[in-house]
Image (spheres, rainbow, N blue to C red):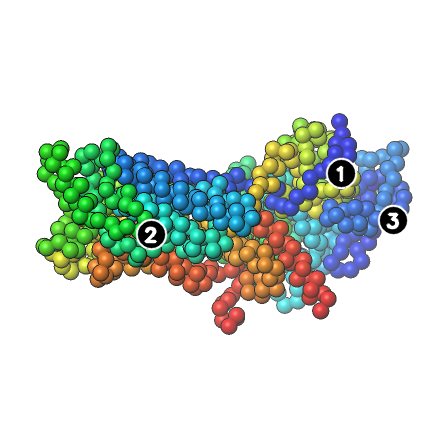
């Protein structure tokens, strides 16, 4: 038996490799988002389903078209753009007009991802850029909330969902719809205000009990309410080693400590730290947006710093800012400083002494 | 006669060579070597009538050899680092002027996954290793001898514990099993918390590091007055039916060794060395040299994972976490793609990379990082040479 003149393959070392690639990671993140999406559809009904589908389709199409224009093989198959679409949909209020969701997706992917060179080169999380764009362009639509478990949510859509592109959204129609739905079911209505805005703008401030917040049976962005489910899905990714746990840990911890300090100072004006943690998009943002590999720092200590930074900024915006919610802008700010964090937290290279002094 | 010297050392950083087989020197020629270059070679014709058992050499008394005698004897015996680098051992045994070596490290940490030569040597030749380590200690006038073994080899630890004399300064330490624990720089840090300075040698921090196989040969050959003519080679991979450790005369062709180990049709690539740092071979007619630690016959299936689609870097930081030198392979990779090779060396410590392959191994984007780095180093070398 000989290997006579069989062509031998010549490759560069290493000759073995762990078998997970980018696609596997992105696929798993997508899978981790699916339960959250399903729960939100159950909570908010048909409108939520349409919203998620629209946002995702818009993102995927945008990336595909850009790839075709650039005459590159399409990159939609690496799942990353699907994640962008899902996250965008999940962070929008369930009654967001579909055309806005689509516009946000196109904007986010086109501006924040494709123009920077596609996957790996974006310095901001594209879903968040799309979301921020919508928030600034259409503040009313983005702050019109729905109560959860609205009767009839599977048989009719929220009137705002099907608003014509660029037509003014009629928030009153939404409230009328909510009242009608409750009246038909013969139960007392609940306001659609989110726990955060009920605290911030309510007179007197109202505090939703933390247990309710944790369960997710509250109004809020489509996929940000169910804290327990988000944590479960996040833990799955951490367990698979596909997410750097230090980011959510740093972020949640710093938010908890800072809001706890405020709460200890004045227990009437400020909510307790659990309220802060489980309301709004903090947990979802920590586990699925801040942890976006591309836009976060690379060193272990840098990642802690980054998480803590976002957590602190979030609480500051919530308490002192004009908005009830601050997670989105806090993460975008975090994205912006992450190259800087990278720069200052480079670990010491083995055997290199006093690197910085030597270089300067 | 087998073991007769056939070449003398031509300088301090070179060693003698000995005939691995009894026969006649036929010619001085050039042969394809494992690095893919044509290198000078001595061709020996096998003599079917000669006695292949007897080995040339005069036993000698080692008890009162001076350090210089030992160094000379090691050079004459043609002993080089058998962990893969094949760096002449006697050079390491003679610390540069003004440097004091206080610790001899006996490296029993396998240099790469798949390879088990060090393990076999420790289990079978613990006595010789101890003898070799003694010689190394005397030559370097070090105080202690530290034997480092990975903690997944309890048998080896036991064997070495038993062989190490209680009344001499031997210490056996078990270390975490993780690639590249066997690299000298990693060892000095893990054992002594000392970092070899960038661009420096272990002797800069008072350490001399020897592979167990090297010491075993030393412990056997120096008292016997013989030369290095054979070594243990791990043959492994899905492409051989009888994988294992083979005591192989130097100069044996890859083909012979592999056929002996049952090379099958399935093998599609032959790697000289370990899976992480070894080089794939263009031909089977390459002689095995002193630095050959292992030969892998990899199958299509085993190779598949290395030829997958390459994505852009997603900055997942896995390479950063994996790099034992604490470099930033991601950054280096980006620079390499832009061909900013000098920048890589000047600001990003390219030359501290010892091509261990960890970064490429973990990269989910399948970026051939190490390959880039090798290229970059080669280009830099060329550029500075032409300056
Ligand atoms: S090959 Fe990669 S992991 Fe290994 S030292 Fe070089 S950069 Fe670091
Ligand atoms: S492992 Fe690969 S994809 Fe991840 S940061 Fe390093 S080079 Fe980039």
Q: Is residue B316 left or right of residue B59?
A: left
Say above or below: B33 vs B120.
below
Q: Is residue B134 left or right of residue B363?
A: right
SS state under label 3: strand
Say which mark, if any, is on residue B195.
Answer: none
Q: Which residue is mark 2?
A: A131
SS state under label 2: helix
Residue B376 x/y as whole percent: 63, 58
Q: Residue at x 38, y 48 (%)?
A: A105
Do we see residue B233 in this rendering? no
Q: Nearer the viewer, mark 2 or mark 3?
A: 2
Say above or below: B3 vs B12.
above
Q: CA distance from mark 2 to mark 1?
A: 60 Å
Q: CA distance from mark 3 to mark 1?
A: 21 Å
Q: Residue at x 75, y 48 (%)?
A: B36
Say above or below: B180 vs A156.
below
Say which mark, if any, is on residue B284.
Answer: 1
Confirm or reject: label 3 Cβ below 8 Å from ligand 1. Answer: no
Sort mark 1 into few (<14), some (14-19) or many (20+) by Cα contacts within 10 Å. Answer: some
Q: Is residue A168 left or right of residue B245?
A: left
Q: Which residue is mark 3?
A: B28
């Amino acid at each position: 038996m000989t290997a006579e003149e069989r062509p031998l393959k010549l490759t560069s070392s290493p000759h073995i490799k762990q078998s997970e690639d980018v696609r596997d990671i992105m696929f798993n993140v997508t899978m981790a988002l699916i339960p959250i999406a399903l729960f939100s559809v159950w909570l908010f009904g048909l409108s939520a389903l349409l919203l998620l589908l629209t946002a995702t389709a818009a993102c995927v199409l945008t990336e595909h078209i850009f790839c075709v224009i650039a005459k590159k093989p399409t990159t939609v198959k690496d799942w990353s753009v699907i994640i962008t679409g899902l996250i965008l949909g999940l962070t929008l209020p369930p009654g967001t007009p579909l055309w806005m969701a689509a516009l946000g997706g196109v904007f986010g992917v086109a501006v924040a991802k494709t123009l920077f060179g596609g996957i790996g080169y974006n310095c901001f999380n594209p879903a968040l850029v799309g979301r921020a764009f919508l928030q600034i362009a259409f503040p009313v639509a983005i702050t019109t909330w729905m109560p959860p478990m609205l009767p009839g949510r599977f048989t009719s859509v929220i009137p705002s969902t099907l608003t014509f592109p660029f037509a003014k959204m009629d928030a009153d129609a939404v409230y009328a719809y909510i009242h009608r739905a409750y009246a038909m079911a013969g139960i007392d209505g609940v306001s659609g205000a989110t726990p955060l805005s009920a605290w911030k703008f309510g007179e007197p401030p109202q505090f939703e009990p933390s247990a309710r917040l944790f369960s997710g049976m509250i109004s809020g962005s489509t996929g940000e309410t169910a804290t327990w489910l988000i944590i479960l899905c996040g833990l799955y990714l951490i367990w698979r080693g596909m997410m750097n746990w230090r980011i959510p840990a740093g972020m949640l911890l710093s938010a908890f400590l800072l809001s706890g300090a405020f709460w200890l100072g004045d227990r009437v004006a400020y909510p307790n730290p659990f309220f802060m943690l489980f309301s709004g998009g903090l947990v979802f943002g920590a586990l699925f947006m801040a942890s976006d590999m591309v836009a976060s720092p690379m060193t272990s200590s840098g990642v802690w710093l980054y998480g803590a930074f976002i957590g602190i900024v979030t609480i500051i915006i919530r308490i002192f800012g004009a908005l009830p919610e601050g997670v989105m802008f806090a993460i975008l700010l975090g994205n912006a400083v992450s190259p800087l964090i990278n720069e200052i937290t480079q670990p010491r290279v083995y055997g290199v002494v006093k690197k910085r002094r030597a270089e300067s | 006669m087998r073991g007769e010297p056939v070449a003398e050392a031509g300088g301090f950083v070179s060693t003698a060579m000995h005939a691995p087989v009894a026969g006649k020197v036929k010619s001085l020629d050039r042969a394809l070597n494992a690095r893919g270059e044509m290198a000078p070679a001595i061709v020996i014709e096998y003599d079917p009538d000669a006695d292949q058992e007897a080995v040339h050499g005069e036993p000698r008394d080692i008890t009162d050899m001076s350090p210089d005698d030992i160094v000379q004897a090691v050079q004459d015996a043609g002993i080089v680092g058998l962990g893969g680098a094949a760096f002449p051992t006697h050079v390491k045994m003679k610390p540069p002027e003004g440097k004091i070596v206080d610790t001899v490290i006996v490296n029993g940490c396998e240099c790469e996954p798949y390879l088990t030569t060090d393990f076999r040597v420790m289990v079978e030749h613990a006595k010789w290793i101890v003898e070799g380590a003694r010689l190394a200690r005397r030559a370097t006038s070090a105080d202690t001898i530290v034997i480092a073994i990975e903690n997944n080899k309890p048998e080896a630890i036991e064997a070495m514990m038993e062989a190490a004399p209680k009344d001499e300064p031997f210490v056996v330490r078990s270390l975490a099993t993780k690639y590249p624990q066997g690299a000298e720089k990693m060892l000095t840090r893990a054992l002594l918390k000392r970092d070899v300075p960038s661009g420096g040698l272990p002797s800069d921090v008072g350490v001399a590091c020897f592979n167990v196989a090297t010491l075993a040969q030393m412990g056997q050959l120096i008292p016997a007055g013989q030369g290095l003519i054979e070594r243990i080679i791990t043959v492994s991979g899905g492409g051989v039916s009888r994988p294992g450790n083979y005591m192989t005369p130097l100069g044996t062709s890859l083909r012979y060794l592999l056929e002996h180990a049952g090379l099958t049709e399935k093998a599609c690539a032959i790697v000289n060395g370990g899976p992480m740092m070894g080089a794939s071979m263009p031909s089977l007619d390459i002689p095995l040299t002193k630095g050959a630690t292992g030969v892998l016959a990899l199958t299509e299936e085993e190779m598949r994972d290395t030829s997958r689609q390459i994505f852009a870097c997603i900055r997942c930081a896995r390479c950063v976490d994996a790099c034992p030198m604490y470099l930033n392979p991601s950054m280096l990779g980006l620079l390499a793609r832009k061909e900013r090779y000098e920048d890589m060396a000047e600001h990003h410590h390219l030359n501290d990379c010892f091509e261990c392959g960890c970064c490429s191994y973990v990269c989910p984007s399948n970026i051939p990082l190490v390959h880039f780095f090798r290229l970059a180093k080669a280009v830099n070398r060329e550029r500075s040479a032409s300056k």
